[in-house]
Amino acid sequence: MRNISQTFLVLLVLNSLAIVSSEFASISSHPEDSADDNIGTDLDGMKKLFKDTLANYDTRIRPREDQSQVVHVTTKFVPQSILEFDTSEQKFSVLGYFRIHWTDEVITWNPADYAQTNTIKVPVTEIWTPSLIILKAFDGDGVVGNSNTDIAKISDVGYVQWVPEGIYSVVCHVDIKYYPFDEQTCIITYYVSDETITTVELDHPSDVNLDEYTANSAWRIASISQRRYLLYNTYHIDVEFKVQRRANFATFTLIMPLLMLAFLNVCIFLVPVGSGEKGSFAITIFLSYGIFVTIVSDTLPDNSLQISYFLLFIIVLLFMSVLSVLYTIIQAKLMSSIGDKECSINCLRPKKRSISNNKVIPFDQDDAMCNTNGKPEVCTVDVDAENEDDDKYTWAMFLEKLDSILFVVFLGLALVLSSGFFSLMLRRLSESTLQDL
């Protein structure tokens, strides 16, 4: 009889060790809700379970039998979508949730005493929870979770799982130098506000994955990482997002129209001087730039600490348009005042053409000098006087030549500026990044 009792006791101990080992294995692997969770079916048993586990529970005390021990809190941030990235206000908002786990040594029970119930769900206000705070929260309230709606799941060995979901908005420093081909780095930092490393150890052991992430139409995540560090005697965890702007929209709505205006501005010098439409065309292009700059100013981020290369590109093109308008006005004034007068600037004067001996010159007897002293009539014609009008070089001719030269100069400047801008913007982007953009 004694041997039977000893054998039964050994089997009971081995069974208990197996159950405990399986529970600790589940804790280490951080399981989610599964079909093995037995919530319980007996009403009186559930009431008794909640009364026995939570009746004398104090939410102000850490859930340790030995208060000198540290509570290990394991977290994992799961991003679901980038809701907003307002570069003007430097606001970065992410929809996601935390998977938070720890062991509560106060809430434990034997499932056999409560109809094999091994899991209960309680409001987070009825148990101790780590007070996680988001650092540099945009709205000033960086509390993780909602105490009015959040529910925690607790197993019979005290394993607690809390999954607070929400929209987390932080202040993110924006670098607009390479707009609209820019890459920004935004960090979500959280910590336990009212604890130290001697009471709570916060950790994020696993990598942040994007299994549940939905792509954003304006931004793509280039990389995401996390790190833990010690600051002010408590652990802080950084979840770092490196995001790149999708430049398709800005390219077709901002850059391409700007390049078209730059080409039209160069075409001002192709309009004939005497057509009377050159001034109105130049003013129209300048006003188009003004309207375009107004539209772009509402799109560009407001940042006085840095200057965007794209903004500098717009300013240079606008300055070229101003020069075109000024030149057109001065040219119109010169044409009206001294356009038919001889020009004294010979740098653009065409070479003199040699007069051919076979050139036919119209004969006017009244203007010719004739000798009729008994000989056949012989007259001399002043060839230089006839060709004087052909060699006259006026200011109108000079301005026409100057138009051709300025067209080539402005076209070259526009091409150099455009190629320099795009090479500066795209040299920091890889081929794979360009395909994703």
Image: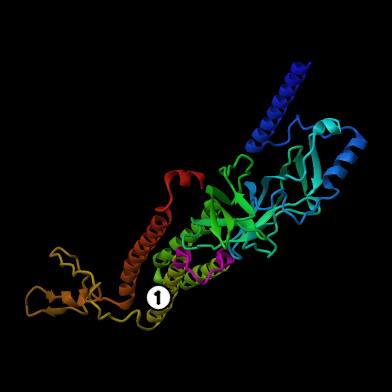
Total residue callouts: 1
- Judged from this view, the residue extending furthest toward the left is 374
Answer whether residue 296 is magenta in the image. yes
The image quadrant of residue 49 is top right
Question: Tag 1, which secondary structure?
Answer: helix
From this viewpoint, is residue 178 visible?
Answer: yes
Query: Which residues are drawn in magenta?
Result: 295-312
Amino acid residing under circle 1 = Tyr
The image quadrant of residue 368 is bottom left
- Left or right of residue 97, residue 393 in this image: left
- Give whichever of 394, 254 is nearer the camera: 254
Whether residue 183 is situated above or below residue 347 in the rendered picture = above
- Residue 299 point in image, percent of width and height: 58, 63
- Left or right of residue 46, residue 387 in this image: left
- Left or right of residue 303, residue 134 in this image: right
Query: Circle 1 is placed at which residue position?
Result: 327
The image quadrant of residue 113 is top right
- Give whichever of 134, 257 is nearer the camera: 134
